[in-house]
Image (spheres, grey):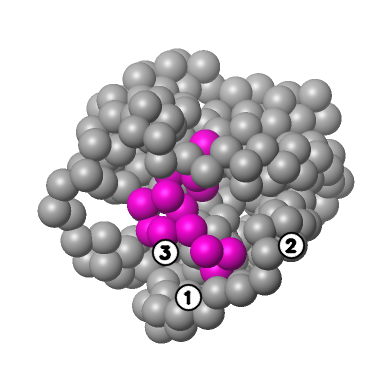
Amino acid sequence: MEIIPVIAIAFMIAVLFSVLGLGGAIIYTPLFFWLGIPLLAAIPMALLLNMVTTASASITYLKQQLVDKRIAYPMILASIAGALIGSYLASRVETRIIILLLSVILLIAALRILFFSNLGFRVKDGKNKKIFIGTGLAFIFGIISSLVGIGGGTFIVPLLLIIGLEIKNAAATSAFIITFTSFSGFAGHLVFGAQTLDIRVLFYTGLAVFAGAQIGSKMIFKRVSSKNISNLFALVLLFVAGKLLYGLI
């Protein structure tokens, strides 16, 4: 495996995704899979990189006090439980089903960004009810993210927007939540799985995504068009989903 292109791709993904409050596992998983790494090894590797990316970004967001901790903490606990369940199920579900589910999630995420990102719907009830709704959905997203190897930020960010957070706070709070979700999923895969991880790839890409996330998390304070980045992200998701589905034929 040629390591330099992988490092460069991981770095660019970390820069772009940290601006959106995401970690990049939704791309890392298929990337590692296409490089010949078994899917059940690609998933925990992607989740670990996802954790490094969001943890790096969260350092900046916490310093800037952009993270809504009251909403984040219960969602973290729920998503951790969900991630452990998802990692347990991963080794017991057929690989083709996981790839199909990942492809469908990528398509849904892309279509949401392209056509349904500005619906303007928000939960208007009290904050306690918002936390309750967010916690329940975080549990479900935790299961799905760990099962198929996505960070979950693709769905956590719009969820936080719906329950009333502003875009910068939603991106920052999502990154903080996903740090714990991804690590729990990674740990669960190590406990319940039997695949050997490529430590060399993890080490160098880990350094790359940490640096990339530091850059991306600081770009959120500058005049960066999040709409253009989101649309580019959606097109990438469509391409990846199409390639995965084509591989199943």
Element assignment for label 3: helix
For the point 47% across and 75% down, which residue is it?
A: 112
Q: Is residue 34 visible to us here?
A: no
Circle number at residue 112: 1
Q: Would you say 89 lies left or right of 101 here?
A: right
Q: Residues within 10 Å of mark 3 (few under 14, many from 20)?
A: many
Q: Where does the magenta region start and end? A: 162-176
Q: Earlier in the sequence, mark 2 or mark 1?
A: 1
Question: Which one is in front in this view, the residue at disc 3 or the one at disc 1?
Answer: 1
Q: Does 92 sit above or below residue 100? A: above
Assign a secondary structure to mark 1.
Answer: helix
Please provide percent x and percent y for residue 12. 26, 41
Residue named by callout 3:
237
Pick the residue in front: 140 or 39: 140
Total label count?
3
Residue at 36% across, 43% down: 18
